[in-house]
């Protein structure tokens, strides 16, 4: 709908058009939350399967526990990512500089959490480093592939 002010036409949104935009934004947010939950479920399932296969191959609980711990750290990373993504949608988008600072903070936070958990797993728990990192990399690969696949199939 357009109005004219003086000789110039101006564009303005009518209330039904505003409501349509808001509904679409809520649909996108709900879809993103659903995808994030599906990705985390896939990470958990893949981690459990990989730990079972590792136990079948090596027949040692320590090897399987290392793979399970690495995958678990990846699940924590994915859950932290999903949580922070949902928190970012709650804040106002008015200040882009603030949003950018939050994104950097969240990325740094996830990096530190992963680094500390991997360090504790290797230094304190004395888990096998290669199996631990293998489980972590497997979990991260599932995070990336599942996210790309689920976004592509939903479009």
Image: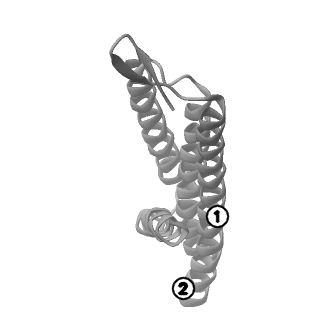
Side of 94 where 6 appears, left or right: left
In the image, is residue 31 above or below residue 135?
above
Side of 76 where 12 appears, left or right: left
Q: Which mark is residue 38?
A: 1
Q: CA distance from mark 1 to mark 2?
A: 30 Å
Instruction: State the residue position of label 2.
Output: 58
Give the class, few, some or many, for how many residues have Cα within 10 Å of label 1's Cα (few <14, many ≥20).
some
Which is more N-terminal, label 2 or label 1? 1
Labels 1, 2: front one: 1
Give the class, few, some or many, for how many residues have Cα within 10 Å of label 2's Cα (few <14, many ≥20).
few
Residue 58 x/y as whole percent: 54, 85
Q: Secondary structure at mark 2?
A: helix
Q: Secondary structure at mark 1?
A: helix
Q: State the residue lying farthest toward the bottom.
A: 57
**How many labels were placed on the picture?**
2
Side of 50 where 97 appears, left or right: left
For this rendering, which residue is in front, 62 or 143?
143
Q: State the residue lying farthest toward the front.
A: 7
Q: State the residue lying farthest toward the top.
A: 6
Please give the name of the residue rendered at 33% of the width and 15% of the height, measured from the top-left corner: 7
For this rendering, which residue is in front, 92 or 76?
92
Please give the name of the residue rendered at 48% of the width and 50% of the height, measured from the top-left corner: 118
Residue 145's image quarter?
Answer: bottom left
Q: State the residue lying farthest toward the left.
A: 7
For this rendering, which residue is in front, 110 or 10?
10
Residue 138 x/y as whole percent: 46, 70
Please give the name of the residue rendered at 61% of the width and 82% of the height, measured from the top-left corner: 55
Image color mode? one colour
In the image, is residue 146 above or below residue 57?
above
Please give the name of the residue rendered at 61% of the width and 39% of the height, measured from the top-left corner: 86
Residue 21 x/y as whole percent: 58, 39
């Amino acid at each position: 709908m357009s109005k004219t002010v003086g000789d110039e036409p101006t564009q303005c949104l009518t209330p039904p058009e505003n409501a349509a935009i808001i509904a679409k934004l809520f649909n996108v947010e709900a879809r993103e939350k659903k995808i994030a939950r599906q990705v985390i479920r896939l990470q958990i399932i893949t981690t459990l399967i990989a730990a079972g296969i590792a136990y079948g191959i090596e027949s040692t609980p320590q090897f399987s526990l290392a793979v399970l711990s690495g995958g678990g750290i990846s699940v924590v990373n994915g859950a932290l990512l999903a949580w922070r993504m949902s928190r970012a949608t709650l804040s106002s988008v008015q200040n882009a500089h603030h949003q950018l600072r939050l994104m950097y903070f969240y990325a740094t936070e996830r990096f530190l959490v992963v680094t500390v958990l991997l360090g504790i797993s290797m230094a304190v728990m004395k888990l096998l480093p290669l199996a631990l990192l293998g489980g972590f990399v497997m979990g991260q690969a599932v995070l990336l592939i599942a996210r790309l696949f689920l976004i592509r199939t939903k479009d």
